[in-house]
Image: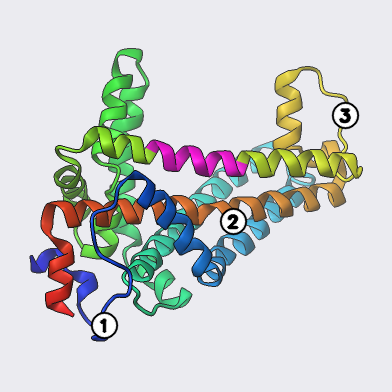
Amino acid sequence: MQEHNHLAQGHSNETPRTPLQPMDFTDILDGMFSLYRSHFRLFLKIVAVYFVLEFGIELTFAYFTTLAASSVIVLMSGFTFIATAVISILVTAGLMYASAHVYLSREITPETALQRAWQRFWTYLGSAILWAFVVVGLAVTVIGIPFSIYFSVRWGLYSLPVLFEGTTARNALRRSTDLVKGSWWRVFGIMLAISLISFMIYFILEVSSGFLLSWMGVAEAEEPTGLLDTLRQLFVPTLSEIGWFSYVVRRLVTLCISAFTMPIGAIGSTLLYFDLRIRKEAFDIEMRVTD
């Protein structure tokens, strides 16, 4: 039991105010938005790191693409992709760690959450690579898609054991397997719902802002040649199409929307993780004894 008790150590003796009990589908979705709303400033400060760094990287890349040769642009594209992935992983990990403390009614600062995310970054990244290697590899062939979906759910909670239990990358996948075992369809449904809700909120805000900026003349581009080109210009217009001012405004709005929706999935996954621990390991009783 001690191996899975990282969060129960080194904290105050305050009894968690959040009821630790099994949650059904609606409880998890309701708790996801309740925790986000009640601790909005905490999550906002964490995602601010993503917003600032991502905006700086994108502007730097956009500036040099107007000056550099094509070979340099290719190298910069690779660097930008890696830097963006690192920032996204780090911030997502920080959001999950903060979500756990919020759920348990423990005090935590954005700095502490991000520090923990950085401490566990390489292990977290290793788990993500193992997960992606199998899931993406199986999805390459049509016959492998069902297996890809199966393992994406079976190992889908790998990030939580890495952050909260201090386990290794490979053991995180095994830990996720143990938690999901016997509840695959339920976990699949909840994960799917969380992903769809997060995507729909992002999509609605992004489309609305795109049309609004176009109506205001901020993001006007060349006449699109088709539906796909219209969608591309709506979501990812290039600097050469809309100019510096419109590009900067558009990226600011898009990154704001992306940062705003990031905590939704992190909080939802965290609540699902604790729900499975309560159901399978009596985590609620363990916390009462520890506190």
State left or right for residue 89 relative to residue 241: left
Disc 1 marks a residue whose amino acid type is His
Main SS of residues in magenta: helix
**Helix, strand or loop at mark 3:** loop
Q: Of tags 3 and 2, which is closer to the observer?
A: 2
Q: Earlier in the sequence, mark 3 or mark 2?
A: 3
Residue at figure coordinates x 35%, y 40% from the top left: 190
Number of the label disc, if any, that sits on residue 260: 2
**Comes first in the chain, label 1 or label 3:** 1
Q: Which residues are magenta?
A: 192-202
Instruction: Characterize the local packing of mark 2: few (<14), some (14-19) or many (20 or more) Cα atoms within 10 angstroms.
Output: some
Residue on which the image places disc 3: 222
Indicate whether 180 appears above or below 58.
Answer: above
The alpha-carbon separation of the residues under discs 1 and 3 comes to: 57 Å
Where residue 266 sits: x, y (%)?
42, 54
- Amino acid under label 3? Glu
Disc nearer the start of the sequence (1/2): 1
Residue 38 percent across, percent down from the top left: 50, 68
Q: Quadrant of the N terminus?
A: bottom left
**Crowding near the residue tagged with mark 3, few <14, some 14–19, many ≥20 C-alpha atoms within 10 Å:** few
- Side (left or right) of 191 relative to 55: left
